[in-house]
Amino acid sequence: MRRVSAYVLTKNEEKHLRGCLESIKWADEIVIIDSFSEDATVEIAKEAGCKVVQHKLSGFGAQRNFALEQCSYEWVICLDADERISPELKSEIEFQLQNSPSSDVWLAPRKSMFINRWIMHSGWYPDYRHPVLFNKNKAKYKEQLVHEDIDYKGKKAYFKGDILHYPYESIKQFVRKSDFYTELRASEMHARGKRFGVLNLIINPAAMFLKMYVFRRGFLDGIAGLVLALLYSSFYTLMKYIKLWELENKKSE
């Protein structure tokens, strides 16, 4: 059986980390890249026998590439602290590792919960944004501040088992996380030379709502789907462009 490292990025994740680590405790090595947490995150990780490396976050793409450098084994499992490997997915991963993986990069559907409801539409499921298992010699993350993509070589395949994702347990948590991510996203757009336009405050939020609620059938997720579409359009998308305007305004002072 091929040996495997699992890595997790953390920052004040004491609430989620135990569940995450429990779902990957069968990995040969668990590496925690911690952005100087101020809660019990590091203590929880050390108690679980993880290798803990503290490293300042300068962007998620760079942080993930740093994580890969800390992993001892060629094969890597990537998981966020608010994610879990489902039993079905665990069985699929173990089968591939036992029989020599038939592909270089494996993706899995991610099923996300929003305030105690699994969201099965709205563009949230299936979500194959990041590979869950891959050969680190065949992959590298793009140096993006947020919503980082990954470049990989070789053959790609898909698991059927889910990654279970618990990103938002309350509206307050959504607002707090979105404030952080929109700050990074606006900075990234500004650095690339993206210019703010007043229509960004009208067209982009409306387009996001239609995309999530209508075209990606968020209406089938009931009230939760409507609330999500409203939050992503009226808060996340709107705030991203307002912060871009703010950065341009500061530049001109």
Image: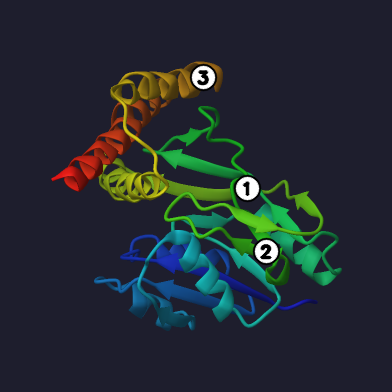
Query: Which residue is disc 3 drawn over?
Result: 220
What amino acid does circle 1 point to?
Asp
Q: Earlier in the sequence, mark 3 or mark 2?
A: 2
The residue at the far left in this view is 253
Q: Could you say where residue 104 lies in the image, as x and y percent from the top left? A: 78, 62
Secondary element type, mark 1:
loop
Q: Could you say where residue 247 lies in the image, as x and y percent from the top left? A: 24, 44
Using the numbered discs, state the Cα–Cα distance from disc 3 to disc 1 in whole angstroms. Answer: 20 Å
Which image quarter: residue 182?
top left
Using the numbered discs, state the Cα–Cα distance from disc 1 to disc 2 in whole angstroms. Answer: 22 Å
Q: Could you say where residue 64 lies in the image, as x and y percent from the top left? A: 51, 66
Q: Which of the image's four quarters has the C terminus?
A: top left
Question: In the displayed structure, would residue 133 be above or below residue 185?
Answer: below
Secondary element type, mark 3:
helix
Q: Could you say where residue 87 lies in the image, as x and y percent from the top left? A: 64, 56
Left or right of 81? Residue 95 is right
> Residue at position x 27%, y 45% from top?
179
Image depth: mark 3 or mark 2 in front: 2
Query: Which residue is disc 2 drawn over?
Result: 139
Q: Earlier in the sequence, mark 3 or mark 1?
A: 1
Using the numbered discs, state the Cα–Cα distance from disc 3 to disc 2 in whole angstroms. Answer: 36 Å
> Residue at position x 34%, y 80% from top?
43
Question: In the displayed structure, would residue 13 be above or below residue 122?
Answer: below
Secondary element type, mark 2:
strand
Q: Is residue 124 visible?
A: yes
Query: Which residue is disc 1 drawn over?
Result: 162
Q: Which mark is residue 17?
A: none
Q: Is residue 226 visible?
A: no
Mark 3 Cα-neighbour bin, 10 Å: few <14, some 14–19, many ≥20: some
